[in-house]
């Protein structure tokens, strides 16, 4: 199976700290897409970003930024100046033939 | 526009029973996928349908089946329920399979006792 691994199961930070969530994926596909989703305590999965395998340009969107490195099969996600509302479980996922999610990283931001 | 809607929101069943979960995609979306999320884990892919045809199936037993209707809504059926089937069942829709961002519903929480 082509796995998506999120080695950090739980991270706790204090508000305003920067935090990086790691994601490493396996794939035999030449074309694939990578996603990050947020799952707040209410349970719904919220789409954050999609990146295709041909686009290694890193992206910044407000306090969020993503670092895609094909050479290391990593797609890391950084939140700058974290806020309590960022507390959630974050999932990295890969789409090739099917969508595969990592196990998730629970982020707790304390005031 | 309404997002992905799932019904019911919660369900309690007994072992051996069957269950039908329903999903209505975002208007204009023709692809629907189903995922099982056991507590504390990431969602696991069950099925994907596109234009009413099955496009993919995850590693789930034949007790799990699904279908997509002409209006692109979908049903997930699970027969002979086991305690281990207790989970949050998520439906997602997209314009096309694979490449589109997936928009998820709020899920159906199934408890098997």
Image (cartoon, coloured by chain):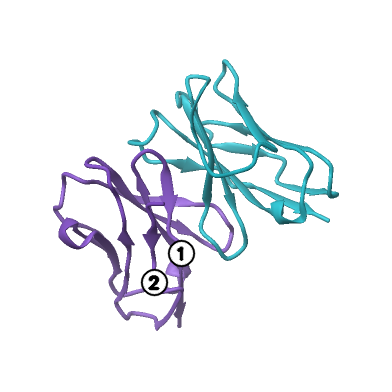
Chain colours: A purple, B cyan
Q: Which residue is depicted at the point 41% across and 41% down?
A: A98
Q: Which residue is depicted at the point 24% across and 59% down?
A: A73
Q: Residues within 10 Å of mark 1 (few under 14, many from 20)?
A: many
Q: Chain of mark 2?
A: A
Task: Give the SS element for disc 1.
Answer: loop
**Mark sitting earlier along the chain (2/1):** 2
User: What residue is shown with label 1?
Assistant: A104
Left or right: A66 in relation to A56: right
Left or right: B95 in relation to A76: right
Whether residue B113 is situated above or below residue B90 in the rendered picture: below
Name the quadrant containing residue B77: top right
Task: Give the SS element for disc 2.
Answer: loop
Is there any visible trace of residue B22 in the rendered image?
Answer: no
User: What residue is shown with label 2?
Assistant: A7
How far across and down, in percent of the image, does residue A60 sit? 21, 59
For the residues carrying marks 2 and 1, which lies nearer the camera in this image? 2
How far across and down, in percent of the image, does residue A3 sit? 39, 56
Q: Which residue is depicted at the point 37% across and 41% down?
A: B101
């Amino acid at each position: 199976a082509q796995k998506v691994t999120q080695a950090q199961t739980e991270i706790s930070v204090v508000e305003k700290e920067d935090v990086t969530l790691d994601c490493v994926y396996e794939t035999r596909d030449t074309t694939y897409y990578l996603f990050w989703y947020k799952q707040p305590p209410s349970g719904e999965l919220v789409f954050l970003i999609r990146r295709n395998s041909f686009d290694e340009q890193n992206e910044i969107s407000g306090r969020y930024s993503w670092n895609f490195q094909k050479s290391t099969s990593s797609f890391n996600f950084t939140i700058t100046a974290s806020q309590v509302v960022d507390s959630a479980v974050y999932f990295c996922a890969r789409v090739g033939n099917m969508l595969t999610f990592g196990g998730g990283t629970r982020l707790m931001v304390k005031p | 526009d309404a997002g992905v809607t799932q019904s019911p929101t919660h369900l309690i069943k007994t072992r051996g029973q069957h269950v039908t979960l329903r999903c209505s995609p975002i208007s204009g979306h023709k692809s629907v996928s189903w995922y099982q999320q056991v507590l504390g884990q990431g969602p696991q892919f069950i099925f994907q349908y596109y234009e009413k045809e099955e496009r993919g199936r995850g590693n789930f037993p034949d007790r799990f089946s699904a279908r997509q209707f002409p209006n692109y809504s979908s049903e997930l059926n699970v027969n002979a329920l086991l305690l281990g089937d207790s989970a949050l069942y998520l439906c997602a829709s997209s314009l096309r399979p694979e490449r589109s961002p997936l928009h998820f519903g709020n899920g159906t929480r199934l408890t098997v006792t």
